[in-house]
Image: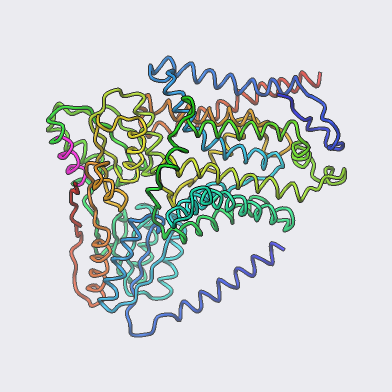
Amino acid sequence: MVRTWISAMLAAGLIMGVTAAGGPAAGIPTIGLAISTLNNPFFVDLRDGAQAAATKAGVTLIVLDAQNDPARQASSIEDLIAKKAGVVIINPTDSDAIVPTVKKLNAAKIPVITVDRAANGGTVAAHIASDNVAGGEIAANYVGDHLNMKGNVVMLEGIPGSSAARDRGKGFRAGLQKFSGVKIVASQTADFDRAKGLTVMENILQAQKKIDAVFAQNDEMALGAVQAIEAAKRNREMFVVGFDAIADALKAVREGKMAATIAQQPKLMGQLAVEAAATVLKGGSVPRFTPVPLRLVTK
Amino acid sequence: MAQPDVNAVGEAPARPAPAPVRLNLQRFGLTIAFVTLVAALALLSPSFLTAENLLNVARQVSINAIIAAGMTFVILTAGIDLSVGSLLALAGAIMAGALKGGVPFALSLLAGLAAGAGFGVVNGLAVAYGRVAPFIVTLAMLTIARGATLVYTGGRPISDLGPAFDWLGGGDLGGIPVPVIIMVLVFAAAYVMLTQMVVGRYVYAIGGNAEAARLSGVNVSRYTVLVYALSGLLSAVAAVILTARLDSAQPTAGLGYELDAIAAVVLGGTTLMGGEGSIGGTLLGAFLIGVLNNGLNLLNVSSFYQQVVKGLVILLAVLIDQRLRRRGGRRRAA
């Protein structure tokens, strides 16, 4: 029975593969967008920006969702090679795991553009991303200025080892250097996750009796922290700064539950990536790195 | 706690004989590990052993503990349920979506609970009547339910759910947080079901030897469907608490929760082979994991070391437990 199921699935997969390969009409250039996950509003915005730019530029955009799985991303990009995509834009699930795939694209002479996360090897025509270190510094400046040079700060870190967590943390710590009286009393990971942001902040609230500010390396954790702080009735004692400017966080900032967030501009990021891809398709040249501006969002 | 005797499967519907020596020692191992951990944390952090923090830990543990209670039933039948985290996300999204769409609060909750139980029934039917391995069925459901959640939410959180939900997550009755009360009720019910009721005896019997249970008149298929339904329902109960605590249903909620739940069950002495284990052990297992997470945060341990420490403590706890159990087993044989 199981075997029948598997063969049925394989057959279905073959049929879908064949139809998809014959998909886009000849003549209209195709750009592939291999996105790490659509399980996150940030990347949904990125895709929306890319889609809008593709429509405007008159190119076909094929979006592939890797669901945060490097293996799935690698195999779906192999499909794009088979389909002879003109340019492939990759938002890698993992900067190291993507390298063999980038090399395969290089071998197939398909130009590669990376967006948001970089690839740690292979040849990449252009990289488009926010400057996370600069974003961390913006957050540090906001915190330092509002604490009047003195106070206890808690940092909620992202997924350990991820480049966003590393860079945002680095920028924040570096930015706080000039505020000598402001010190980080606790720095713990909550994996960029709202539920973990809640529990980790609850625990830190137990350990730290005096906190003046919280910097969360993304808004999901910041919103979890806000829930914890409100439940502990300590919201007058401290303010919370997030990162990413997702819809829920922007609302929290408007309502005064969060003090600020650092806005990446995922739509702009997607748009710039597709525009660069369209330029490459026409044989034009693009800068190796395009920093997408970040901005501080307050009430 | 009295335990139905696992070895008595041939006469499953009959009254179970107690097996006190071995089972008491079994529980003892985990208790020693737990007490040691608590004592160490109390020495290391002045904030740990306070009433406020202990209630905080209990509230945090409630979600994993409730899922693990359902998981205990499934694992006792020698099954596994990998879909709990996805079902939690789906149930949470349905509750929040219904509420935002103007459905009355109680009905929204019921819709979410029904969805959890309903998808659990589908798991159970595929396992019992489709004869597909539970690992595969619930792995498929993990993907299906997560995908359905993404479709339903469009990948975005559903937030700002209002005061009624707020109370379920953040309220208290006489100082005891509501999530903790829900957890206690769930475990009390599970305890009664497993030790005092026919269904409990059947669950142990199916896990001990499904064929023997069937031959002695147990409707194995029906009870298999029941345990998966229960697991789905309890995932939805956990969804109520998580959604209320965050004031938001997250499409990514519950990612990886199946592993925490399975860890709690196995730490609690329930064997993955089925037929042997206890609901009390699961509660202790869930608390061990929760206390560990809490302690590492209180001590501000670097996130890189945290993962190493967590793994080591869990491994150590099981090793202690196994040693005592083996010794207990020998004594019993002697």
In the rendered image, which quarter is residue A121 located in?
bottom left
Residue B317 vertical position relative to residue B118 in the rendered view, above or below:
above
Residue B149 within the segment the image draws in magenta: no
Is B231 left, or right, of A172 in this rendering? right
Residue A135 on image: x %, y %: 20, 46
Which one is in front, B167 or B255? B167
In the rendered image, which quarter is residue A222 located in?
top left
Residue visible at 63% across and 24% down?
B321
Residue A179 on image: x %, y %: 13, 31
Question: Please, what is the dominant secondary structure of the magenta stretch?
Answer: helix
Q: Residue furthest top?
A: B43
In the rendered image, which quarter is residue B24 located in?
top right
Residue visible at 19% across and 52% down?
A294
The magenta region covers A135-144
Which one is in front, A264 or B151? B151
Residue A34 on image: x %, y %: 38, 64
Image mark count: 0
Residue A210 vertical position relative to residue A26 in the rendered view, above or below:
above
Residue visible at 64% across and 20% down?
B28
Is B208 left, or right, of B171 in this rendering? right
Is A15 left, or right, of A190 in this rendering? right
Residue A143 within the segment the image draws in magenta: yes
Residue visible at 78% across and 40% down?
B202
Which one is in front, B34 or B100? B100
Is B238 left, or right, of B167 in this rendering? right
Residue B176 vertical position relative to residue A12 in the rendered view, above or below:
above
The quarter of the rendered structure image containing the N terminus of chain A is: bottom right
Q: Residue furthest front?
A: B104
Residue B208 on image: x %, y %: 77, 38
